[in-house]
Amino acid sequence: MNIATLCIDLAKNVLQLCGINAEGKIELRKQVKREMLSETIAKLPACEIVMKSCGGANYQARVFQGFGHIVKLIAPQYVKPFVKRSKNNSQDAEAIVIAAKTPGMQFISVKTIEQQDLQSLLRVRESSVETRVKISNQIRGLLAGYGIAISQGLSKLRTMLPELFDRAKALTFF
């Protein structure tokens, strides 16, 4: 078995491998459980590995690079047009093979741990900001139902809320 390019469809528990030789002929079709993937790849001679870029792809790519493989990631939207018939892991792995060998295909670089950490922090921050905006808009909308209009902007809400709480305390008879 002489695999030049190995394409992997990363799924939840069972992953699909599809390997081709230098002429483009399929040499390997294999299902592998996630916990056996690294062991399986470590046994292969150095080759090009192509995977769809997804949640676990960067981690797996770094592991495979450690075994001496050349790893390329491909955006899922570039693989989708090559899926034949019904979608399943085997069909996806073969579609990755076709997409990877398409002339002019653009690949995504593998992120280092530092790049991945920074991206994670930025995504968490972005999510926090979105949540803050949603909550402030919801508060503004609820107060509008009581005839209290607050202009847009977080600073306006921050200055008005303490005043509203003080007024509410003054009206309380307890």
Image: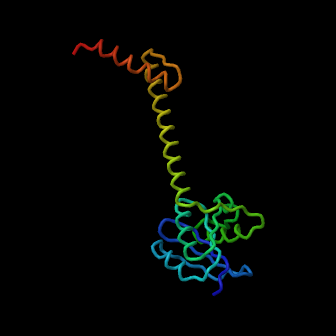
**Residue that sits furthest to the bottom in the current view:** 1
Q: Is residue 146 left or right of residue 79?
A: left
Q: Is residue 50 left or right of residue 163?
A: right
Q: Residue at x 53, y 51 (%)?
A: 118
Q: Is 160 drawn above or below residue 91 in the view shown? A: above
Tell how many labels.
Answer: 0
Camera-side residue of 12 and 61: 61
Q: Is 169 drawn above or below residue 82 in the view shown? A: above
Q: Within the image, what quadrant is residue 163 found in?
A: top left
Q: Position of residue 9 (x, y in %)?
A: 58, 68
Q: Residue at x 50, y 32 (%)?
A: 133
- Quadrant in which the N terminus appears: bottom right
**Residue that sits furthest to the front in the current view:** 114
Q: Position of residue 13 (x, y in %)?
A: 47, 68
Camera-side residue of 51 and 85: 51
Q: Residue at x 50, y 48 (%)?
A: 121
Q: Position of residue 138 (x, y in %)?
A: 46, 28
**Residue that sits furthest to the left in the current view:** 174
